[in-house]
Amino acid sequence: MIEVLVITISNPLLIGIYEKKKLIKEFKLDGKTSDLLPELFEDLLKDYNINKIIYVNSPGSFMAIKVAYLFLKTICITKNIELNAIDGFEFNSNSPIKALGKKYFIKTNNEIKVDFLEKDSIIHDFKLPMCIEKYNFNKETLPIYNLPAV
């Protein structure tokens, strides 16, 4: 079973190819989600028989989340591939994620808030896990924006 994990909420974009839940290939791509995903998936769909795509649907760049969702949902519908989602805190050691201006998304006790960082806050880069067996992916895949309406 081939699964693809897509993290588009920061730069570089991270895409991992997993076989039997273990990472077999990874891509780190600098640029815009809208430019990079179509090119990469053209090759991935030729090279692999993909059974599932998992993407990070919250929190982070709204535009990247929207573009990733629309693109990946379309691929999944047309190719009959399962789509799942997960929040980005799973892949950066639960550290703050850039929001707007000088504010960050901060997850505490399963609640996400937007606030300024404390002086001693540590921000970790996103990383693809070596194995995705322990993660609980969500079948509800709509983007979650985590910000109040303006």
Image (spheres, helix red, strand yellow):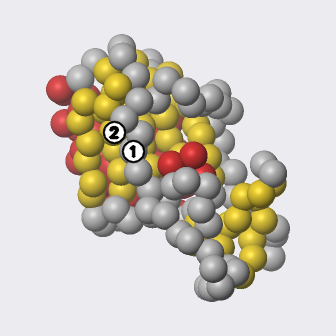
* Res. 17 image quadrant: top left
Tell me what residue is drawn at x 50 percent, y 41 percent.
55
Horizontal side of residue 131 vs 38, given as left or right: right
Disc 2 marks which amino acid? Gly
The residue mark sitting in front, 2 or 1, is 1
Horizontal side of residue 14 vs 146, given as left or right: left
Secondary structure beneath dot 2 equals strand
Please provide percent x and percent y for residue 120: 63, 79
| Residue 100 visible to an observer of this rendering | no
Q: Are marks 2 and 1 in contact (CB under 8 Å)?
A: yes
Seen from the viewer's position, the closer of residues 96 and 40 is 96
Horizontal side of residue 132 vs 47, given as left or right: right
Q: Name the residue under label 1.
A: 128
Q: Quadrant of the C terminus?
A: bottom right
Badge 2: residue crowd in 10 Å (few <14, some 14–19, many ≥20) = many
Q: Is residue 108 above or below residue 90?
A: below
Please provide percent x and percent y for residue 117: 68, 79
| Residue 141 visible to an observer of this rendering | yes
Q: Name the residue under label 2.
A: 16
Seen from the viewer's position, the closer of residues 41 and 137 is 137
Secondary structure beneath dot 1 equals loop
Disc 1 marks which amino acid? Leu
